[in-house]
């Protein structure tokens, strides 16, 4: 099972490594996949060290890029005034990428994060309890999800990279090209090439953590679904082995809950980063679109802003749905466990059932935002209702501002409304 998981996760790990997001720690405790051919018993450690150094380089590059861009709000070789919103969007995106790279570096570096998750996944799919329950790890099902997500991630990277290249080497929207290169000159060919490479890497750093989150949550949700299928296929009213089955289900459910806690140690910071900075970026993009429409509408720039606005909402949406799915699958057993027939149950059987019921109806099981709020469907609906009310409030205020303000003052007033409403 270890070999199988390593094989179908390899394209994702390779993609993450290309963008400096995946490496093996100095002393890995998880046995790597082994081929049937002859291998050196002591493989050289040069490549893992080089990959780890490359990951550190990417973390430093993303962090220094934030510092590099800050002076562009006031000075620059090709400085253009009245582009503050564009610069804010750019610097927020750069900050998000810097946080992504740091979070994933810690996730793969710390042995009690990804290393522990790998060991727990191997154990929970190959232990005696899984054999007794005859659970199917659904390798092909999870594999298809991971491959599709990886392909989708590469499509986003290639599309955005191609668009950035077109933006730099054409007159489609010169203003955005200036903003991306600030505070350096946009007329240097060498700088344009370097910026295209940097934006390509930044796109991968931005999108592939979402692919990793999707892959991990899909695997965990599938394991919880298997337990649901086991109980659903067990005659809880008259099956003679129902109490032994529920005992095994409880033990495996506890292992899966510990797996969720392990993954949440790092992913909770990534989820908070996604929510906070993507929503902030969306506010400034909406503000800039309103500013463009209120003056002389620039169709290319509005189209670009619309694409980036959709991306700002898409990543939090995918992250929320998959995180909420883990919570739903983890508590899904509660709808079936009440149907068990307790006739003939011993005190030990009743104790196991009560502990399972207490776990299912206790604190929420799932991924969280900084370990504070567990992501559930109810939380998503509450957040959607809250943001909808804010948007309506914003729309009312913005319409009043547009009616009573000229175009020069419109930008500052709308940004104040968005920040303080």
Image (cartoon, rainbow, N blue to C red):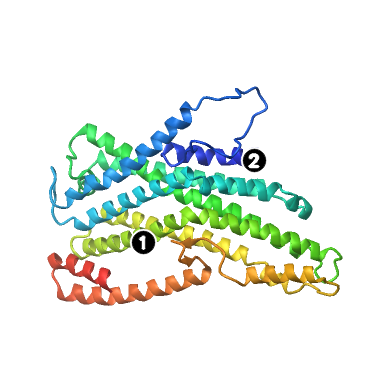
Residue 306: quadrant of the picture: bottom left
Residue 231, how many percent across, how many down? 75, 64
Is residue 251 visible to us here?
Answer: yes
Residue 44, how many percent across, how many down? 51, 24
Using the image, determine if residue 265 lies above or below residue 392: above
Question: Which residue is at 14% across, 50% downward?
Answer: 80
Left or right placement of residue 312 versus residue 184 in this view: right
Q: Gap between marks 2 and 1, in whole Å?
A: 36 Å
User: How many numbered marks does the figure carry?
Assistant: 2
Quadrant occupied by the C terminus: bottom left
Left or right placement of residue 213 versus residue 333 in this view: left
Using the image, determine if residue 55 lies above or below residue 35: below
Using the image, determine if residue 205 lies above or below residue 191: below
Question: Which residue is at 33% across, 72% downward?
Answer: 391
Packing grade of label 1 (10 A; few <14, some 14-19, many >=20) is: few
Residue 174, how many percent across, how many down? 21, 46
Nearer the N terminus, badge 2 or badge 1?
2
The residue that mark 2 highlights is 2
Residue 115 badge: none
Which residue, as the protein is rendered here, is positioned at the far front? 347
Packing grade of label 2 (10 A; few <14, some 14-19, many >=20) is: some
Q: Disc 2, disc 1: CB below 8 Å?
A: no
Q: Nearer the viewer, residue 275 or 55?
A: 55
Q: Nearer the viewer, residue 195 or 63?
A: 63
Regarding mark 2 in the picture, which secondary structure is present there?
A: helix
Question: Which residue is at 33% across, 76% downward?
Answer: 392
Residue 245, how many percent across, how many down? 78, 61
Q: Nearer the viewer, mark 2 or mark 1?
A: 2
The residue that mark 1 highlights is 276
Is residue 199 visible to us here?
Answer: no
Regarding mark 1 in the picture, which secondary structure is present there?
A: helix
Using the image, determine if residue 210 lies above or below residue 50: below
């Amino acid at each position: 099972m270890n070999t199988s998981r390593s094989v179908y996760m390899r394209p994702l790990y390779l993609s993450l490594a290309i963008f400096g997001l995946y490496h093996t720690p100095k002393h890995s405790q998880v046995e790597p996949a082994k081929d049937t051919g002859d291998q050196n018993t002591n493989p050289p450690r040069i490549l893992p060290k080089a990959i780890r150094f490359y990951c550190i380089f990417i973390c430093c590059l993303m962090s220094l890029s934030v510092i590099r861009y800050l002076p562009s709000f006031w000075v620059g070789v090709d400085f253009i005034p009245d582009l503050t919103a564009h610069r804010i969007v750019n610097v927020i995106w750069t900050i998000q990428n810097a946080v992504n790279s740091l979070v994933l570096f810690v996730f793969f570096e710390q042995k009690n994060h990804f290393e522990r998750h790998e060991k727990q996944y191997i154990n929970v799919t190959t232990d005696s309890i899984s054999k007794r329950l005859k659970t199917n790890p659904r390798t092909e099902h999870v594999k298809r999800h991971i491959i599709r997500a990886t392909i989708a991630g590469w499509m986003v990277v290639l599309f955005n990279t191609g668009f950035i290249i077109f933006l730099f080497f054409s007159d489609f929207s010169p203003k955005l090209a200036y903003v991306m290169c600030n505070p350096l000159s946009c007329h240097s060919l060498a700088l344009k090439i370097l910026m295209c490479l940097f934006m390509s890497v930044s796109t991968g750093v931005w999108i592939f953590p979402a692919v990793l989150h999707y892959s991990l949550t899909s695997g965990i949700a599938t394991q919880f679904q298997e337990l649901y299928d086991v109980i659903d296929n067990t005659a809880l009213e008259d099956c003679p082995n129902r109490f032994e089955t529920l005992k095994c289900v409880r033990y495996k459910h506890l292992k899966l809950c510990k797996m969720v806690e392990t993954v949440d140690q790092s992913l909770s910071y990534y989820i908070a980063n996604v929510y906070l900075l993507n929503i902030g970026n969306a506010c400034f993009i909406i503000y800039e679109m309103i500013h463009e429409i209120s003056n002389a509408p620039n169709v290319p720039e509005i189209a670009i802003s619309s694409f980036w606005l959709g991306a700002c909402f898409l990543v939090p949406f995918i992250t929320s749905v998959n995180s909420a799915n883990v919570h739903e699958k983890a508590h899904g057993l509660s709808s079936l466990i009440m149907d068990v027939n307790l006739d003939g149950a011993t005190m030990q059987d009743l104790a196991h059932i009560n502990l399972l019921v207490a776990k299912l109806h206790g604190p929420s099981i799932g991924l969280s935002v900084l370990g504070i709020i567990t992501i559930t469907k109810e939380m998503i609906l509450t957040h959607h209702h809250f943001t909808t009310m804010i948007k309506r409030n914003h729309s009312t205020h913005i319409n009043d501002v547009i009616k009573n303000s000229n175009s020069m003052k419109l930008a500052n007033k709308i940004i104040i409304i968005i920040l303080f409403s």
